[in-house]
Amino acid sequence: MNAVVVELLAAIALVALASLSGWIAAGASGAELMAFFALGLFFLRQLWMVLRLTRWARSPLGTPTPSAHGAWGVIFDLLHRRGRMASAEREQATLELDRFRRAAEALPDGVMILDGHRAIEWMNLQAEACLGLKASIDTGSRITHLLREPEFLTYLDDPDHRGLPLELRTQRNPGRCLQVQAVPFAAGRILLLVRDVTQLQMLATMRRDFVANVSHELKTPLTVTLGFVETALDALEDTPPKEIAQYLQTAAEQAQRMQQLINDLLTLSSLETDSPPPLEDPVDVTTLLADIRQEIEALSAGRHQIQLENQGPRELLGSARELRSAFANLAGNAVRYNPEGTEIVLRWGAEVTGGARFSVKDSGIGIAKQHLPRLTERFYRVDRGRSRDDGGTGLGLAIVKHVLERHQAVLQIESELGQGSCFSAVFPPHRLQS
Ligand code: ADP
């Protein structure tokens, strides 16, 4: 029984006893008895209110305050107001904490909070994915027990390194390159930021390779051109003009190669940076195929047997210039890389899926399996020397792939060494018009 209840019961007993003894003794006047009785009741009410207040104070948060009249009513109202203000503040704080958590969850980078002992207090989904951890299992565990790579342990232990990023490859997420940054904050805690930089690393490598490739591709024709021009200059006085003209002719051919390379590079770069072509430009496929056939017949000069089969939709929607360059590239390769007598069939036909396919099939030399996945890489050639001699830059199929991607089409390559090849461009139904 609590103290207030005991006090209340004692007061009731006291008032009852006093009233009874006054009544029995009848020594007190009626008015005195009444006043005494009223005082007792007043006292009782105060104790009753204190009891209600105590009960309310013990009840769960949010319980409405008791109702009462007079001074107690005012006190309860004030308490009610304070309670409301406190719960509004609590709600606001919960809301802000929730918002902060959701913002941290939505961050594209991983975020983890470590306590003073390096135990995980919290982490977002990205941190889980990057580090191969699970918040439901690993929260509370020391990060140093989960990620045991020596460079990471040294990094965390060294206050000089913290704040600077560390590149980390962890066994928990093989094949990925992570950038980790530890930022110390309140009371020995550490905010660990994690970012997957695998893609960036690959891009940096590609960029380096690209620059090396371009320099290499330009270096050879430039050296040859310079060599012939210098020889022609040195021999100008005592060499017959016919020989000089030969030197200059070779130099001009090499210059043309460089020009072709630069043109292809510019084409690739504009394909990569421009937005995809709109649908409104209808390209007449019959005319396009006839032009391409004429072009490769000129290139072949009668050495190949060229056929054209056109049973597909009448119009393709997209960029006439880009489609022409892609189709001509595929058809031109069939002539340039295959020997005399090779049969080449250009075919345009509808697909069962509702799309359409442009294919260039040849009965030529074919390509060994191991080269197929790499054919569309920039500067990739099956036979380097041969491709260069034929004026190839190694960028042709990279350009074709880009053009097709911009038209939501795909490039399919089937080839077998010694059996010939088939290069196809498959277009989706929304790019066609009958
Ligand atoms: P390039 O611009 O030098 O012609 P491509 O990117 O167009 O280079 O082609 C890449 C390589 O694919 C070429 O070096 C060639 O060896 C091979 N190739 C392309 N088409 C054919 C084909 N029809 N038959 C045999 N090899 C081909």
Image (tube, helix red, strand yellow):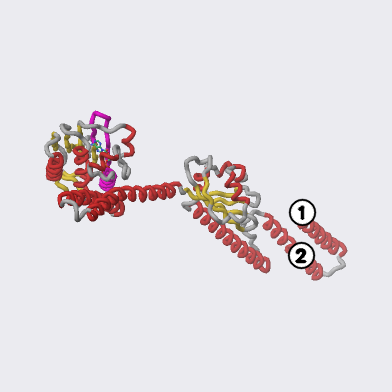
Give the CA separation, mark 1 to mark 2.
18 Å
Using a 10 Å C-alpha cutoff, classify the residue at mark 2 as few (fewer than 14 neighbours), some (14 to 19) or many (20 or more): some
Q: Quadrant of residue 72?
A: bottom right
- Under mark 1, the amino acid is Asn
Name which residue lies at 14% across and 35% down: 303
Using a 10 Å C-alpha cutoff, classify the residue at mark 1 as few (fewer than 14 neighbours), some (14 to 19) or many (20 or more): few
- Label located before the other in sequence (1 or 2): 1
Residues under numbered marks 1 and 2 in contact, where contact means CB atoms less than 8 Å apart: no
Q: Is residue 298 above or below residue 37?
A: above
Name which residue lies at 85% across and 68% down: 28
Q: Is residue 132 visible?
A: yes
Residue 47: x and y, percent?
75, 61
- Can you tell which mark lies on residue 43? 2
Q: Quadrant of ligand 1?
A: top left
- Can you tell which mark lies on residue 2? 1
Secondary structure under badge 2? helix
Outermost residue toward the top?
419
Q: Quadrant of residue 13?
A: bottom right
Residue 201: x and y, percent?
44, 48
Name which residue lies at 49% across and 51% down: 109
State the extent of the magenta-drawn residues as a range.
395-422
In front: 348, or 244? 244
Image quadrant containing the C terminus: top left
Q: Is residue 31 above or below residue 377?
A: below
Comparing marks 1 and 2, which lies closer to the viewer? 1
Residue at disc 2, CB closer than 8 Å to ligand 1: no
Question: With 180 as the anchor, is 225 left or right in this view?
Answer: left
Residue 23 sits inside the magenta stretch = no
- Under mark 2, the amino acid is Phe
Question: With 247 as the anchor, is 114 left or right in this view?
Answer: right
